[in-house]
Amino acid sequence: MTRNADEEPQRSPGESSDWRTPLRIDGPKAAVEPKSHLVVGFTRHQSSLAALHRGMDLAVRLDAFLHVAHIVDTDDLPVDPDRDDWDEAIADAVRRERRHACDLLASLPGNWAYYSRPGNPAELLMLLADANDAEMIIIGTSRGGMLSRMERFLGESVSEKLVHRTRRPVLLVPAETSG
């Protein structure tokens, strides 16, 4: 059953849950009513962190509500599926992602919500953007390497899917580099 992001149960950050259960955490309500909405895809990769920072900056400049989504995917899975604590290892990875994102979002003076759920990243980002009539979807650029080339070849690249399937602008943010 597909539900809008607004229909999902809201939980406090400390509440534990099964990593398979969709989760939404709302940040504190800002004094200013948002004029628009932005959606950011968030993972543990550097370009994704840069995308979150860019999304936060744009949210402040545009008085936008920032929707940050972590889609549980293969990056969250432990290497060895035969581990006795395989499920708990996934849950730990998902909790670390949530804490990291929410810690960063705590400094945002505007409205925000954090979402976590398993599924197809591109499809869920588009669903979230459509449900909130978002101005744009912001994601980090490809990680590079063999895995990224394989994803692109197999048609599984999140950025490729978003660029070709959504009617919304897609902002690709490279990893921040020092120097």
Image: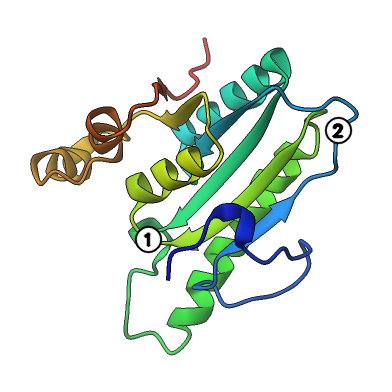
> Which badge, 1 or 2, is on the more N-terminal residue?
2
In x, y percent, where is residue 96?
61, 58
Q: Residue furthest top?
A: 179
Q: What's the residue at 81%, 27% (across, down)? A: 33
Report the quarter where the N terminus lies.
bottom left
Q: Mark 1 points at which residue?
A: 119
Mark 2 — residue? 30
Is residue 61 left or right of 27 when viewed as pictured? Answer: left
Does residue 60 lie above or below 114 as drawn?
above
Q: Which mark is residue 142?
A: none
Q: Which residue is drawn at 74% across and 44% down?
A: 103
Q: Where is residue 152 in the image (x, y as percent from the top left)?
A: 15, 38
The mark lying in front, picked from 1 and 2, is 2
Q: Residue furthest bottom?
A: 84
Tag 1's secondary structure?
A: loop
> Which three-letter amino acid code belongs to the residue tagged 1?
Gly
Please provide percent x and percent y for residue 17: 64, 76
Left or right: where does residue 80 sit relative to residue 70? left
State the image coordinates of residue 42 (x, y, percent, origin top left): 51, 42
Query: Marks 1 and 2, how far apart in space?
Result: 30 Å
Q: Which of 22 and 98 is in front in this view?
A: 22
The amino acid type, in three-letter code, at marker 2 is Ala
For the point 10% across and 46% down, the residue is 154
Report the label total: 2
Category of crowding for the residue at label 1, using alpha-carbon neighbours closer than 10 angstroms: few (below 14), some (14–19), many (at least 20): some
Q: In this view, does 52 lie to the left or right of 27?
A: left
Within the image, what quadrant is residue 173 found in? top left
- Residue at (67% x, 67% y) in the render: 9
Question: Which scheme is used to colour this image of the protein?
Answer: rainbow
